[in-house]
Amino acid sequence: MDKRSIIAIAMVFVILFLWPLLFSNRKKNTAIPPPKEQQIVQKQEEKSKTDVTEPKSASKIVSNWQQGTITTVQTPLYEAKLTSDGARIVSWKLKKYFNRTGDLGEFNLISNTAQKCLTIQFHDPKLQEEMSKALWKPDKQMLNIENNGYDSGTVEFKYTTSDGIEVFKKMTFSKDSYLVDLNVSFYNPTSQTVKLSGYDLCWGNGINEDTLVPTMELAKDGPAVLLKTEKGAKLMKHWQRSGFGCFGGKQTLLPNGQEYEGPIYWVDFSGKYFAAVLIPGNDSWWSEPKQSGKRYTVTTGTNDDSVSPNDVWHTWGDSTTIALTKREFALLAGKTESDGFQAYVGPKKWNILRNIKIKDSSESLKLGKMIDFGIFTPLGKATLWLLQLFYNLGKNYGISVILISVLIKILYLPLTQKSFNSMNKMQELQPRFNELREKYRDDPQRLNKETMKIYKQQGANPLSGCLPLLLQIPVFWALFSTLRGAVELRGAVFIAGWINDLSLPDTVAAFSGFPIRILPLILTGSTLAQQLLFGTGSAPGQSNKMMALMPVFMLFIFYGMPSGLVLYWLCNDAFTFGHRYIIKRSKDKKEKDENERKLKNEVKDKPTGKRNSSKGKK
């Protein structure tokens, strides 16, 4: 392998793996107290002022909602608990996803400190003060659509204000969807028109993510909004990176009140694997660009507008509330005004998100934009599609990863073959290049001229060995981004007792606190075996110090990687090993046959001893 090939391989590894490793979490998560809350509306009532100065503890918050009437909703996908205190959701347990530390029960997306999950917050301070203390009246305390034969069911809350206005919040839950249809309506039984200054449909504070996800990775998610612009849909994140990652990098926060004014698709708060999304209805207010005003708000109750990425999730996330903002409207006497919304509360699963449409429309909601496929998005989507396709065949994501590696190896076989042929050619020419360097050591121009002459005569190209490697970078990067963040691999078992979660390293034991992981060790052994068999230098039998360190480099890079990604690279490395071995066997056989042919010709052309003796007698 020539010097340029070595540099190309090093570049591939740095781009694919070293960069993300620099941004991985290296310190344990520390518990940070819930930050002070800040309300969305500009005017703040007295109760909110009290909350800001003296935050409630989690236990007090829990006991607070337990004082209200609890309504439980059971579906095949989740169990939700709603309280009459604010007509809000206080628990959302996903039945197909489980905690990976501590209590290994169903994963709850809502934390104990969250008080605004699907709450209505009015812009009128006086009305909001009343509503903040209100106990709504639910129409039922249990809704079970898990096995009752119905596809959906509803829970409706009602509250009558001191002015006589009746407020209704109706939630429709579906049997096979994480979407919740929400209808908010106001009825004016009085004889006079009432003007309401508007309200916000809120979600906060944040969502839960399991502690096994490094906080550094969570910093790239958080609150975001999908805008409707003249150039199409545009995702705008409210947590943005500045600087250069671990080298003094910071995460900056868009200040409260800096939201985009214009039409939107939705606003969300997401983590690595899960998200809560607020989706507006079909009212022209949400989609008409000519109407001025903010359709959403993202409010963070902290004064820190720049923090380390490691601290983002707890410093900002635990105090962030997202909301859809409805402007003021008039409620005529004896009339009802209604607004429709939707909320998605569940996993960031591509097969689910990409199929969700705008209500009563064939247009996609584009919820899939929450998933980060890296800079090669089409390739990332194709990888995820293949992952699910192969899973449907074998019902095991580990097998899916192996089949993907086989398919990619087959697709790149011509390029790989060309690369190996080029490397072999360069190895054959290496002795001649060494002679030229020795001969023209004092004449660089002549050396370069003679070197190029040999390239031309032999049909060799020093870059032809690197080019196939560089062409594979987009695919490798797409695989890395997809397999590293796919919720499909979260909790996916490949080999029980060994690889129990493809989204985590395959730790099988610990020695003095140091984790023992088998896949990276096997991968390192495979790399070392290739060096012993094929050498590490530019010519057979030669040694290269840089390449000799490759097994250590591989171990360092892959030891903290998810086992699904290490499994893919191990399979790819094993197939490469086999391919190179076949080429070596073929080359060795060809050289052996050539040597035997030459030996036979030499024996044939050499005079026999009998003829020589007869000549001597004469």
Image (cartoon, grey):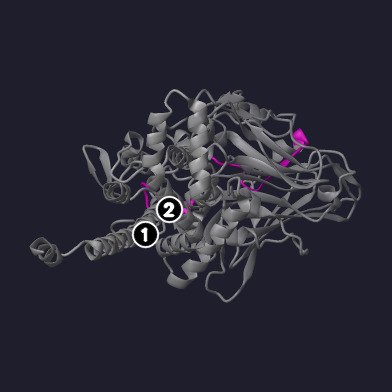
Q: Is residue 122 magenta?
A: yes
* For residue 229, side relative to residue 61 (left or right): right
On-image quarter of the C terminus: bottom left
Q: Which residue is mark 1?
A: 583
Nearer to the camera, 582 or 375:
582
Residue 420, numbered label: 2
Residue at point 87%, 56% (across, down): 335
Magenta region, residue range? 101-126
Of the numbered discs in the image, which one, if any, rests on residue 336?
none
The x, y position of residue 447, in whole percent, is: 48, 31
Residue 397 location, quadrant:
bottom left
Q: Quadrant of the N terminus?
A: top left
Relative to the observer, which residue lies in front, 520 or 224? Answer: 520
Secondary structure type for disc 1: helix
The three-letter amino acid code for the residue at tag 1 is Ile
Residues at discs 1 and 2 in contact (Cβ within 8 Å): yes
Residue drawn 57% across and 76% down? Answer: 149
What type is the residue that disc 2 sits on?
A: Phe
- The image shows residue 166 at horizontal and vertical percentages of 77, 52
